[in-house]
Structure formats: structure tokens, C-alpha cells
Image (spheres, grey):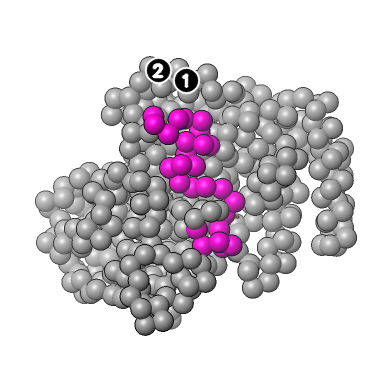
Amino acid sequence: MAGSVIVVVGTQWGDEGKGKLVDLLSGEADICMRFQGGGNAGHTVVNDFGDFKLHLVPCGIFNPDCICILGTGTVVDPQSLLEELQTLEQHGVLARNMLVSGRAHVVMPYHKLLDQVEDEARGAYRVGTTGRGIGPAYTDKVARIGIRISDLLDEVILREKLAVVVQRHNALLTNIYHQPPLDLEELLSQALAWGRQLRTRIIDTIPLMRLALRAQKNVILEGQLSAMKDLDWGSYPFVTSSSPTAAGAALGSGIPPRDISRIIGVAKAYSTQVGTGPMPTELQGAEAENLRKLGGEFGATTGRARRVGWFDAVVTRFVTELNGCTDLSITKLDILDNLAEIPVCTAYRYKGELLNDLPDTAQHELCEPVYEILPGWQTSTLEVRRLQDLPYNARAYLDRLTQLVNVPLHSVGVGPHREQTILA
Ligand code: GDP
Ligand code: IMO
Ligand code: MG
């Protein structure tokens, strides 16, 4: 892949297996950058170094020649980042190439507190956030009172900015949420300590990316979540506070849209979601238990049981079109190995009408899935490494999904390990 910018995005509700794919592709990458989100991500990588759940560090970190960057569009909890880097180093992973954009925003301790109390207060519109302070950190950014990573290096600026934020949030925290007030000096000394520890990793990404593009380097832009949780295009208000799309990748990385060469959408062979929001193919009871158990569907960040259901082609088609996906990576095919029959949602029924397109949140909530039942293959695919060696019905299943979504197949996941991947 000489001189390419590849964007990897989810095409369902997150947790599609983006981390595994980014780890694999990063073997040939010069730069791997996260462009939005923060510690709400839980990207699982299983390779010869071990089994990792990365929240902030990009999944290119296992290639010592790959520069990993937390881009300008991200929100970074410095304490979590430092702890994650320490864990990686304890496992023999060199993290010296890990950099952070000085323009990225800081997730402060009060953002995590606000995340919890504000989500509780949403009542019926509770999002079920990861509690990592993501929404409040982006809220401060938009309100133009956010603390940027580069601010951690300047005591005078930091004191001035924190004084404004603390006054504002204290009014809210003490009066509305009945929490103890924040202490300016305590926050300041904590934040300055983070600045000292991260100093050598903080950069202006613009010159670096400019040089990389001119020198035809291979860049991977690692998305978090999926457009179903996009602030504008997802199931609002049951969304995150950033844009996990290819457009968001250009914005958050500072790479011009025309320099993006490929956009790989990642889709699980079935559906999962964490948190609230519509999910027409969601299963209940024993059927849900069974699929959840087969897929090990528990959140990588919060450990919550993920909601599970059948593949929803309406959702994935919507997301891949929105992103302009050039490729589709289907993961966790092996999880369906033992099933006799596999339903696939091809359209919705809404108030008696047949819908092929995704409606907005309130109508989506009321949609009923129209299923096509495909035959299972009831053979293990864990050891398969070439498309032509897959059982006939597994090939037919993949063919049907790519036909419904109308994006060519890039790869297929047949197990959690990096090696358990079939490249199409
Ligand atoms: P991400 O957030 O998109 O990176 O995905 P997560 O790591 O949250 O969730 C994906 C889960 O599926 C992780 O436990 C992965 O180890 C696992 N996984 C990814 N691809 C495959 C696959 O093809 N087969 C199996 N069995 N597990 C996979
Ligand atoms: P990865 O990158 C799955 C969900 C939360 C909640 C909503 C908003 O591993 O795919 P937030 O904390 O962002 O304000 O929560 O989004 N959510 C995720 N679900 N995978 C993730 O990340 C998620 N990050 C956030 O459950 O519904
Ligand atoms: Mg995840």
C-alpha cells in the first residue's frame, strides 16, 4: 500500500472489530492516528504481544516503526493515557512513538463527574454513556472553554482558563447536582503534572502530516464507534459527541478529504450495541443470551452486556453510503459457525409500509425488521485463511451481505487473533 491514506470506520453501533483490523493493517503503516473520540473506545487487539483492550492508544502501536498519534479531533484523559502506555510497556510494547496533538482537548476529572450526573438527569433520553467524560469535554470545546493539551505546558494560561471553567462548573455541580465544589489549585497541580509527563509527546501535527503526505507515507486513520452514534447522523440523542465518519476523519486529522484513498467500513456478521437507542433486529431472552455467549459480547470499556441482534443491512448500507466506503470488512463470521439458519434484515416494515432506507430516530424505534433466512454452514471457519476454502454457505452469506450493502469485500474475520483474517 504505497502512499495511501486509509480510513477505518465502524458501520453498525461500534465494537465491530476495528481494532483488530487496524492492528493488522498497521504492519505496513508509517502513521496510525485516532481522529475523534477518546477513552470511550475499547479496541481489542490479539497478537503475539498478548491480548489488549486499547482505549486511547491507536492500534498501530504494535509496529515499532509506526508513529501513533492522538489527533486534534480527540479528547484525551492524560491519566488514562499514561496508565495505558505503562501497561503496554510492561508487555514489551515500545510506546516511544506515541504522540498527542497539542490541539486535542483534555478530559478533566470534572468531565467524568459531569458525564455521570448529566446522563442520569436525562431521564427517558438517557444515553448510557461510557462515563469517560466524552460528552462534557466536547461540550466545553464547543463552548470555547475547553482545556487543550498544549495548555498543560503553560501554568499561566492554564490557571487563567481553569479559573473560568471551575467557576462555571461549580455553579452547576453544587446547585443543580448537589456535588462538592471543584478545587482550582488541586486541578491545576494535577494538570501541570500531566503536562510534565507528556511534554515530549505533545506535537503540532500539521508539519508532520504535511511531510508524510508529500513523502507518500502510509497513513491509517482509526475510527472509533460508528456513524450510528454520530452526533449529526446517528440515532440522536442516543449518540456520542463527535463524528465517527470519513468526513470526521479528514476534519479531526487535518488531512484534506481529497488525500483519502480508501475507506474501509467494518461490520460484524451480526449486530451489537451498547447503550440506548433504536435497534430493530435486537433479540431478547434465550436467543439473545445464546448469541451474546457465542460472541463474548461484553463491552471492552465498561464490561456491560452488549445488546445483540441479527445483521441489519439497512443500517450498514446507510452507514457505508454516508462514509463513501470503498471496502467492507466483515468480522466474527466464526461466531455463526454452528447455527442452522441465520436471519438477515433486508428492509423494515413501518406502519405497514416497506422501508429500504433508514428513517430518523423516532420512526426507527418503531420499525420491524423484514428478514431473509439464510442457511448456516455448521462447520468451523476458525482455521480458514482463503475465501475459496470457506464452506459454500459461508461464502453465500458473505456474498449476500456485500450485495445488500453494495460495497466490495475487503476481508473476513474468523477469530480474534490478528492471523485469523481472510483477505479478499
Ligand atoms: P472495536 O471497538 O471495533 O475495535 O471492537 P471491540 O474490540 O470492542 O469488539 C470486538 C470483539 O470481537 C473483540 O473481543 C475482538 O477480540 C473480537 N473479534 C474481532 N474480530 C473477530 C473475529 O473475526 N472473530 C472473533 N471470534 N472475534 C473477533
Ligand atoms: P468503540 O470504539 C460501543 C456508546 C455508549 C453510548 C454512546 C455515547 O470500541 O467501538 P459516550 O461515552 O461516547 O458519550 O457514549 O456511545 N459508545 C460505544 N459503544 N463501542 C464504543 O467504542 C463506544 N463508545 C461509546 O455506550 O451509547
Ligand atoms: Mg470496542
Q: Is residue 415 visible?
A: no
Q: Which residues are magenta?
A: 234-259
Res. 210 mark: 1
Q: Is residue 31 left or right of residue 4?
A: right
Q: Position of residue 404 (x, y in %)?
A: 25, 61
Question: Crowding near pointer 2: few (<14 within 10 Å), some, many (20+)?
Answer: few
Q: Is residue 206 above or below residue 331?
A: above
Mark 1, ligand 2, within 8 Å: the answer is: no
Three-letter code, disc 1: Arg
Decide: marks 2, 1 in contact (CB < 8 A)? yes
Q: Quadrant of residue 338?
A: bottom left
Q: Amino acid at mark 2?
A: Arg
Whole-number angstrom distance, CA of label 2 to CA of label 1:
6 Å
Q: Is mark 2 within 8 Å of ligand 2?
A: no
**Residue displayed at 32% across by 63% down:** 313
Task: Give the x, y percent position of residue 219.
Answer: 40, 30
In the picture, the disc for residue 214 is 2
